[in-house]
Amino acid sequence: MRAPPVISLDLDDTLWPVAPVLLAAESALIEWLRTRHPRAAHGHDIDSMRALRVKVVAQFPESSHDLTFVRTRALLEQFWAAGYAQAQAEAPAGEAMEVFLRERNRVEFYPDAMPALERLAARHRLFAVSNGNADLVRCGLGDWFEAHVTAAGAGAAKPDARIFAELIRKAGTAPESILHIGDDPLADVIGARRAGMQAVWLNRADKPWPTALGPAPRTVSTLEEIL
């Protein structure tokens, strides 16, 4: 494997575990709604609000890659169902979304993440490529990355070729000069390979490689091994 000038990294479950982050953010959101807008919160919990988002995805499949849109639309429909007029719902839904995003960006990094980023940034140009709605600046990573390619910005989520094409465009280099690192076999490894990039699977939990995806790729269990 050639040492590339550009390294791109996934964020959720690559630099931090995402499940506890989302649970904390959704818990904070429902508590905020119960305090500030009890009518909209009535009869809802985390599971019912997740079900609302599933309905939004089914209703707007063309926007399913944009998780901020999905969450905002679900909140609007929650307010509308509670009797808020369309115009009245926009401001509290926006405030609710900000509550979620504030907590969603309170991440706890894997122990190897920050030391590895510091060393990688000294040798390579770093880019983030993510399907989620984490914010690099809010997460405290703004200084390490040259750019953040998001599914919402690219109009498609990994493994779609369009998000990797946007990375290649922003990096201004040949795809084979980019190494992508991520935890998802299909979204990160196969998606990057199909785009002509190099790829490494970050397998922190010692999971088996899905045989349906072909031969296993270069695999590491921590970011330190990339160094």
Image (spheres, rainbow, N blue to C red):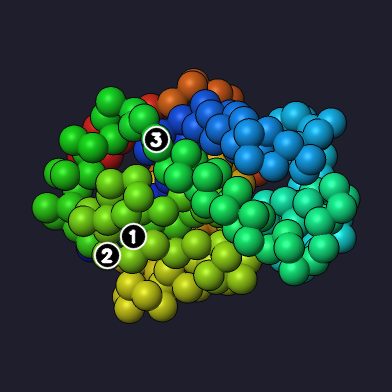
Marks 1 and 3: in contact by CB < 8 Å?
no
| Crowding near the residue tagged with mark 1, few <14, some 14–19, many ≥20 C-alpha atoms within 10 Å | many
Label whose residue precedes the other's in the sequence (3 or 1): 3
From this view, report whether residue 65 is shown above or below residue 39. Answer: below
Q: Mark 3 points at which residue?
A: 107
Using residue 2 as the reference point, say whether residue 181 is left or right of it. right
| Secondary structure beneath label 2 | loop
Q: Is 122 positioned to the left or the right of 92 in the image?
A: left
Which residue carries the number 1 mark?
Answer: 127
Q: Distance between the residues labelled 3 and 1?
A: 18 Å
- At numbered mark 1, what does the secondary structure look like: helix, strand or loop? strand
The quarter of the rendered structure image containing the C terminus is top left
Question: Where does residue 39 sit, x and y in percent of width and height?
Answer: 79, 40
The residue identified by callout 2 is 146
Mark 2 surroundings within 10 Å by alpha-carbon count, few (fewer than 14), some (14 through 19), many (20 or more): some
**Residue shown at the point (41%, 72%) measured from the top left:** 168
Nearest the viewer among 6 and 74 is: 74
Residue 66 visible in the shown view: no
Residue 22, position as x, y percentages in the image: 56, 35
Q: Which-is-in-front pick, marks 3 and 1?
A: 3
Quarter location, residue 158: bottom right
Q: Which of marks 3 and 2 is nearer the N terminus?
A: 3
Q: Residue farthest to the top?
A: 206
Q: What residue type is labelled 2?
A: Glu
Q: Please state which amino acid type lies under the numbered disc 1.
A: Phe
